[in-house]
Image (tube, rainbow, N blue to C red):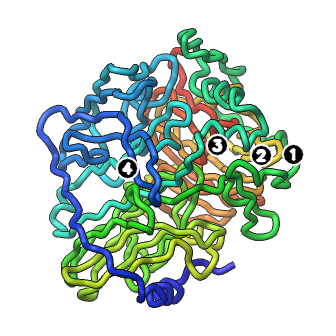
Amino acid sequence: MPHLSRRSLLAAGAAMGALPLLPVRATAQLAAAPGTRRLTAGTRILDVNGRAAKVYGLTNETGQPGLTLAPGERFHVTLANQISDRTIIHWHGQLPPWRQDGFPWSQVPRVLPGSTLTYDFAPIAGTYWMHSHEGLQEQRLMTAPLIVHTAEAMREDRQEVVLMLHDFSFTAPEELLAHLTGQPVSAAYAMEHLTENVSAPAPSSDNMAGMMPGSMQGMPGMMMQGSMQGMGSMQMGGMSAGGMAGMSGRAGMDLNDIDYDAFLANDRTLADPELVRVERRGRLRLRVINGASSSQFWLNLGALTGRVVAVDGHEVHPVSGSVFPISMAQRLDILLDLPGPGAFPILAQLEGSNRRTGIVLATQGAQVMRLAETGLDQARPVDNSLETRLSATQPLMARKPDIVHQIVLAGSMTPYKWSLNGQYWPNIAPLMLTKGQRVEIELVNQSMMAHPIHLHGHTFQVIAVNGQPINGAVRDTVIVTPNMGSVRFAFDADNPGRWAFHCHNLYHMMTGMMTEFRYQDIAV
């Protein structure tokens, strides 16, 4: 099925010509504050197509989402929890000491209601984001941008525009998970707690199961062998009730586990999009963050041509185009040079669907027409067509691997369970590493769904896609396509600790698709 084309976007804009114009509002610019920064985990009310929705949020001292750090500024941040539940925030793509990474190991404190926790580490520059790793809070929009500037980027004299994507449901995420698994909501709550911690029991008031890790296998030098466990039936089954979707992108492929009520761009739908004031012939850096919990998109620049110059915060040699895929948790930095005055929609269309969201760039006095929330064409499944075109400006030094692991991704919609090498979190055997090793990981996807795989605490370089060697991008999240799709990446074991490795589809992670990379001599 075709993806959203420039032709269809422009045709849709023309078709909307009879609709009323929208006012243009300038976006606020965030300024870094000296000393300790402050983040607040709280609640807020969104208007989602005329209906009020109470969600979580992470806001800075000015009440704006997330943080923007100046060149050379430390990540010296105090997080205040103002919600009624405990939380823990992961600084996605950053490389802090492992106890500051924001994953709920037993050695890492949660931020309890009414309390604060301070972090202090040297950040790496680029486009990153933050999100809760506590249960299903991410789906409730406990997320925000994390932008770390470089002096070089500041000298570009480009207007910066951040576009953060979300999927949204009025249904509680525990209910969504219960429908997917075919279990009662109480079982979904238990699963949520079980996923949080595998090393020690949590306080009894939180009703956590306190599972212990599995046997210590996967030692350095051992090739991990895949497993066909958990493959089960690949039929979608009777998942149409309760907001579940069974969309097939092409034969033998499953897409879009959940039929969401809305897709958001900077917390708004296309019924009332954010309108960003830009200059005629303006020069922009568009930072796109896919913060969705279970949705992948095609980003469409419409009449514009952009140059991708960084992925997941790390620079790549420029790749030109107008349509780019973006999987869950991935980021794109795109340079745009506007041709003149006008209104320029930047749209994100859900794979396997005609549903979309986005923002509009508009110059002073430009007429801005309303855009339909559905496009003319159905987008094809997100793939690695961009990945194979990317090459890092600062690749890894050439070196033979000390160890190689193969990890098989498997699972099914019925039963709804997802695994890595036949193991389901929290009953896993950690992959043991030693500092200084060059590690290569071969991911093989035996399931019928794509999986965006994320490694905490490290960056890696993609070195092969579907068996074809490439000198690819340095990044922290990579998509592995269905039906025996494969990705191979390499990284240096240079950050001792305990590190989560998981699918960034929240519901796949919650039902088993996660493991641990643990360094030798790290006590548990």
In three-dimensional space, the C-alpha distance between marks 3 and 4, rounded to whole angstroms, equals 22 Å
**Mark 2 and mark 3 residues within 8 Å of each other at the beta carbon:** no
- Mark sitting earlier along the chain (2/3): 2
- Mark sitting earlier along the chain (1/4): 4
Type of amino acid under label 4: Tyr
Considering the numbered disc 4 on the image, is that residue within a helix, a strand or a loop?
strand
Residue occupied by mark 1 = 232
In three-dimensional space, the C-alpha distance between marks 1 and 2, rounded to whole angstroms, equals 7 Å
Type of amino acid under label 3: Tyr
- 269 above or below 329? below
Type of amino acid under label 1: Gly
Viewer-nearest of discs 1 and 3? 3
- Mark sitting earlier along the chain (1/2): 1
User: How would you rate the neighbour count of disc 3 (Cα within 10 Å): few for under 14, some for 14-19, many for 20 or more?
Assistant: many
Please provide percent x and percent y for residue 19.
41, 83
**Mark 2 and mark 4 residues within 8 Å of each other at the beta carbon:** no
Residue 224 horizontal side relative to residue 161, left or right: right
Residue occupied by mark 2 = 411
- 101 above or below 312? above
Please provide percent x and percent y for residue 443.
67, 50
Give the residue drawn at x 27%, y 45%. 67
**Mark 1 and mark 2 residues within 8 Å of each other at the beta carbon:** yes
Considering the numbered disc 3 on the image, is that residue within a helix, a strand or a loop?
helix
Please provide percent x and percent y for residue 471.
51, 64
Q: Which mark is residue 128?
A: 4
Type of amino acid under label 2: Gly
- 145 above or below 118? below
Give the residue drawn at x 31%, y 23%. 117
Q: Which mark is residue 507?
A: 3
* Quarter containing the N terminus: bottom right
- The one of 336 and 265 positioned closer to us in this rendering: 265
Give the residue drawn at x 44%, y 68%. 270
